[in-house]
Amino acid sequence: MRPALLRFRRSSPEGLAADLADRVIGQPQAMRQIVPYVEMYQAGLAPDGRPAGVFLLLGPTGTGKTRTVEALAEVLHGTPRHLLRVDCGEFQMEHEVAKLIGAPPGYLGHRETTPMLTQQKLASATSESSSLALVLFDEIEKAAPSMTRLLLGVLDKATLRLGDNTSVNFERTMIFLTSNLGAREMHRELCPDFGFAVAAGAPVGEPAKKLEAIGMQAVRRKFAPEFVNRIDAVITYQPLNQAALETIVDQQIADLEQHIQNRLGDDAFELEVADSAREFLLRTGTSAEYGARELKRAILKHLTQPIASLVARGEIGAGATLRVDAAALRLVLTVE
């Protein structure tokens, strides 16, 4: 049966790539490498007997690797939470990997152990708009070696054998592996003299190729050749430049404004964030080393929590305007 058509913008030949680029700022090359595999699945031309696509996402932290999978879920299924995520940091010990497939019959705790990767859970990661399930193995380098051995059959034959001897079919899945392998070496390459200097911009040309080479060297040191050879594309994310970071700040402030309107309804108010406040959030929530990773935390601490205090005390009326400025190394909220 041909997979259900995916719904995304078709205003240009790169409609899906544009949709993803709107959500994952500063990584257009990464988006363009993923899109052809989605289109092959949509057209019913994905290879038989293997996943629709297998991707290893490398690069410095805070550049959008995990966000890419969430953005794709949002485009395909309508919500960034509609995916099956495995936090590999929870599987650092060999015996913990058994939780993915469940204990075999006859072993102690067999009936109490529910596998994390089942056909039902893959089905729950699909939707009416798309039958393509997204599976994310976050920070794959943290997992025990038995995790990669377990994945060999999944990446090659799209089949996983569970502890009870049943099989899970991964043909209608797209598998993403994220990793920070080589990230420190990449940072030293970008900032050889000043460890925390702000990068002037994302590398282009030869510097970008250098980062890709650093990442691949780290991958080959960590994983066996038979594992690496089963990956369709190794994508190296570039450090975010100043313009990209500013766009992300604007995007997350817009998300907060929408959240206020959605949650408060008739009691909602307008949020006006001055340029000085945006610059404050940019300084406190972004860096060359961690990209935009800390930005959500900075907005939560310096903006969302103070707003919540004003709302809880009844100091903001419906339809009022809350202006946010920066002064004396902090944000200042004024109700107008």
Image (cartoon, helix red, strand yellow):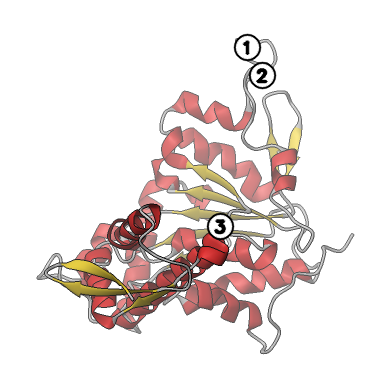
Q: Residues within 10 Å of mark 2 (few under 14, many from 20)?
A: some
Residue drawn at 55 percent across, 55 percent down: 176
Q: From this viewpoint, which residue is outermost toward the bottom?
A: 12
Q: Quadrant of residue 335?
A: bottom left
Picture coordinates of residue 301 (x, y %)?
A: 29, 56
Where disc 1 sits, the SS reads: loop
Q: Quadrant of residue 80?
A: bottom right
Picture coordinates of residue 288 (x, y %)?
A: 24, 68
Q: Is residue 233 visible?
A: no
Q: Amino acid at mark 3?
A: Ile
According to the image, label 1 marks what residue? 107
According to the image, label 3 marks what residue? 231
Measured in 3D between alpha carbons, the distance from the residue under mark 3 to the one under mark 1, in whole angstroms, is 33 Å
Nearest to N terminus: mark 2 or mark 3: 2
According to the image, label 2 marks what residue? 104
Residue drawn at 46 percent across, 70 percent down: 269
